[in-house]
Image (cartoon, helix red, strand yellow):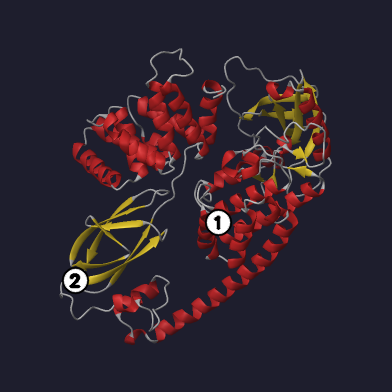
Amino acid sequence: MTDDEKSKKSVIEPPTLKLAPGDLLPDIEGFDVQGIQGEGGMAKVYLAKDLGLDRLVAIKMISSQLGADPDFRTRFRNEAQIVAKFRHPNIVRVYAGGEKDDAPYIVMELVGGDNLKDRLRSGALDVAEAIDVARQMADALCYSHSRDVIHRDFKPANILFTEDNTPVLSDFGVAKSALPEPNPLTAVGVVIGSLPYMSPEQSRAEPITNRIDIYSFGRVLYEMLTGDLPPRRMTDVEIEAQVRTDIGKFSPELADLVCDCLSPDPDRRPSAEECRDRLDVIRQSILVDEEVVEESGSRSKMIVVGLAVFVPVAILTLAALGKPPFPPDNPLRALLTPSQEAAPATANHYFDTDPPWMTLYVDDEKIDGFANLAAGRHNVVAVEPNHYGKIVEIEVGSGPVETAIKLERLQLPTDEELGRFISAIESPQVSPGDLQRVAEKSLRQALDIKRLADSGAQEELAKLEGRLDVLRSYDDPSSAVTLYLAAESGYLERDSAGLLPALQTAMNSGYALATFWYAARLRDALAADIVVLDDPVFLQYCEAMQLAHDQGFTDVAARYLETECSFDR
């Protein structure tokens, strides 16, 4: 391969979205605008080529509604000039700014990697990686705050990764100068930001300081460590207790930092500089702890091997799973010792669960992680609202045994994946490629039901439907969505309306995909194409779609909200 061929092969053309009917690409002097990359309520981002410097860039153009306000345009221009002077390795570069037909825009560095929101779809990050990303983001906020610029919309979607995996903070387009200004547009009465990460004072449209970024930073840090957002609707004491439980297992100092960042009182939140410095100390402490645990684990394995002839078989099983033997005073030891009073045909069974707080049912009876089971086969149902439920069959013999059960975190489909699912579920036949291209489990299982129904594999279909019904009866949200979609599409001989209560339960558990399809059901129930704004069904539809948006199905739900529910409710 020649050098020219290598260089051509290394060029990555960023994907662009289809334009909406009637939309045109803006004509901006000095740039060849090639397509639209993203769209939100406040702006559109275009892929363009800088003709003067022969490089690809991103151009963010603010919506005409905001651009029509002369005060906003003035402040936006001033802030663009400030951000254009930023020189920080963890902040996206702003090259230039201007106006086109009274719509302000900024020209930014094009970042070639993915973003933190995409990475979190598959669950929490490794603790060392999460701390490393957070430390660099704290340094970026420290830099911007020292120049009197508040980001205002700190969230995973705005944390991008370069091709060498360096995190960079983007989207200062809604930033607000922290310097006092007369009649500030966003000081009081206007809420700009993303609800799941928004500080209490910001959501109430109260005067703000740079501590709103710290609150958002704390929520993102919690999400990187756990895969979930921290609660918002409990009391302050309850929230702090849960945060300390969830984060304290990594480090008490890390739990302290997250709690401080999430304080409802802005004055109690640390500065970005303090967050960065505390993370430096925590990072070193965790790295040292990991080294000690690794060395300790190696020594423990050597000791277990040396004493193998004296250790019961159950303890050897645990050691093989990487677990140290129970110390003599551990009450769990008794559970692994066959009781003299127990019948010979029963055995103590321990379940190693991930996440540890999942709910377990053995043969329809709820257990707390341990069960005395008769020899033979048993069905175990494992459910947790934020994970895909699972049915596990176990074989119990005469001795104590451990079973490991790990649940996958719920994920949401991308716009493209959802589009592929809808096309496949409505097509005459499902191809193997359709199943492979849909990663989200609820959608993929619905397609699998269609495949089995089309092929006449009634026995397999009944078996799959039965397993899903069992999981649904234990309030597994994914199974409720799968059964509803399959019934609604006509591939199961049952009325989809009968599955709506289960869909509502899944919606209330926080599963955004369930909320989205419930909203779609309400939308289909509208009596006419032209609706009255105070129609109760229409209002319920908009509320459900807003909830799907707030639960994380942001991009898809936003399109419906902007086109159909953009009115003053």
Q: Which mark is residue 225?
A: 1
* Mark 1 residue crowding within 10 angstroms, few (<14) / some (14–19) / many (20+): many
Residue 51 seen anywhere in this rendered image of the structure: no
Secondary structure, mark 1, is helix
Q: Quadrant of residue 170?
A: top right
Judged left or right of residue 140, residue 205 is left
Q: Which mark is residue 31?
A: none
Q: Residue at x 21, y 40 (%)?
A: 462
- Above or below, 19 against 296 in this view is above
**Left or right: where does residue 516 sit relative to residue 285?**
left
What's the distance in space between the residues labelled 2 and 1, CA to CA?
40 Å
- Mark closer to the chain start, 2 or 1: 1
- Count every numbered label the image shows and give the total: 2
How far from the left and from the top, in percent, is residue 115? 61, 44
Q: Quadrant of residue 354?
A: bottom left
The residue positioned 26% from the left and 43% from the top of the image is 469
Residue 325 falls left or right of residue 265: left
Say if 142 sits above or below 495 in the image: below
Image quadrant where residue 426 sits = top left
Amino acid type, residue under disc 1 in the picture: Leu
> What quarter of the picture does the C terminus occupy?
top right
Residue 534 position within the rendered picture, expressed as x and y whole percent measured from the top left: 47, 19
Taking the spot 25% from the left edge, 40% from the top edge, the residue there is: 465
In the image, residue 175 above or below residue 138? above
Q: Is residue 67 above or below residue 317?
A: above
Q: Position of residue 564 (x, y in %)?
A: 52, 21
Judging depth in this view, the residue of 526 and 42 nearest the camera is 526
- Tell me which residue sits at (33%, 83%) in the image: 311
Query: Label 2 amino acid?
Result: Thr
Identify the residue position indicated by label 2 in the image: 346
